Image (spheres, rainbow, N blue to C red):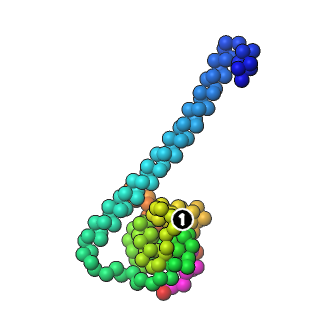
């Protein structure tokens, strides 16, 4: 590279250096965008945890209307997330968030393998949205999930 630069004129050297720095700026901007996206995800998770904590304290030990069964122990993450979303939707749960899906899964026997189960559930739900099996809506700073009609036919009604 040094031999190449030595054979160039000063304006060419400046143009080459400018191009190199512009490329580095583009790379750094992309890294910043990725970090900002991760921060937005953390904010969503934080607001859902706060909401779930306040809802749990308001319940004061009242049993959940979701029946507990251990059928989720045999399911994979994406399948369990879709099934949980559909079941929550069928019992008319309002504003189904990833935290509610995650809690339903673990309450019904799903065994989380990763360090952060909520992030794994979020990833599974986003994949389902990309496959057009569910709808993802951002409402009030939170992401709300709703199963599409086609997905609901895959899980038998209870």
Q: What SS does tag 1 mark?
A: helix
Q: Is residue 59 magenta?
A: no
- Tell which of 76 and 130 is nearer to you: 76
Residue 128: image location, x then y, percent: 56, 66
Residue 102: image location, x then y, percent: 44, 69
Q: Residue at x 49, y 73 (%)?
A: 111
Horizontally, residue 22 falls left or right of residue 147, namely right
Residue 148 visible here = no
State how many labels appear: 1
Horizontally, residue 59 falls left or right of residue 10, namely left
Residue 95 visible here = yes
Residue 78: image location, x then y, percent: 56, 69
Height in image: 105 above or below 22?
A: below
Predominant secondary structure, magenta span: loop
Height in image: 1 above or below 101?
A: above
Q: Residue at x 41, y 66 (%)?
A: 99
**What residue is shown with label 1?**
124
Q: Quadrant of residue 18?
A: top right
From the image, which quarter does the N terminus lie in? top right
Q: Residue at x 39, y 68 (%)?
A: 95
Q: Which residues are magenta?
A: 151-157
Q: Residue at x 64, y 26 (%)?
A: 19
Q: Mark 1: few, some, or many residues within 10 Å (few <14, many ≥20)?
A: some
Q: Quadrant of residue 48?
A: bottom left
Q: Is residue 153 magenta?
A: yes
Q: Residue furthest top?
A: 10
Residue 84: image location, x then y, percent: 48, 75
Height in image: 8 above or below 126?
A: above
Q: Quadrant of residue 130?
A: bottom right
- Tell which of 155 and 17 is nearer to you: 17
Q: Residue furthest bottom?
A: 158
């Amino acid at each position: 590279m040094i031999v190449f630069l030595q054979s160039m004129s000063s304006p060419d050297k400046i143009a080459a250096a400018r191009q190199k720095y512009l490329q580095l700026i583009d790379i750094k901007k992309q890294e910043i965008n990725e970090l900002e996206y991760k921060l937005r995800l953390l904010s969503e998770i934080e607001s859902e945890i706060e909401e779930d904590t306040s809802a749990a304290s308001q319940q004061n030990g009242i049993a959940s209307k979701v029946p507990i069964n251990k059928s989720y122990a045999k399911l994979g993450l994406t399948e369990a997330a879709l099934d949980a979303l559909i079941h929550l939707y069928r019992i008319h749960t309002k504003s189904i968030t990833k935290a509610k899906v995650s809690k339903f899964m673990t309450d019904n026997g799903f065994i989380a393998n990763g360090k952060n189960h909520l992030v794994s559930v979020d990833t599974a739900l986003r994949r389902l949205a990309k496959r057009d099996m569910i709808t993802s809506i951002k409402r009030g700073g939170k992401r709300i999930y709703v199963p599409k009609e086609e997905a609901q036919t895959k899980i038998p009604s209870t």
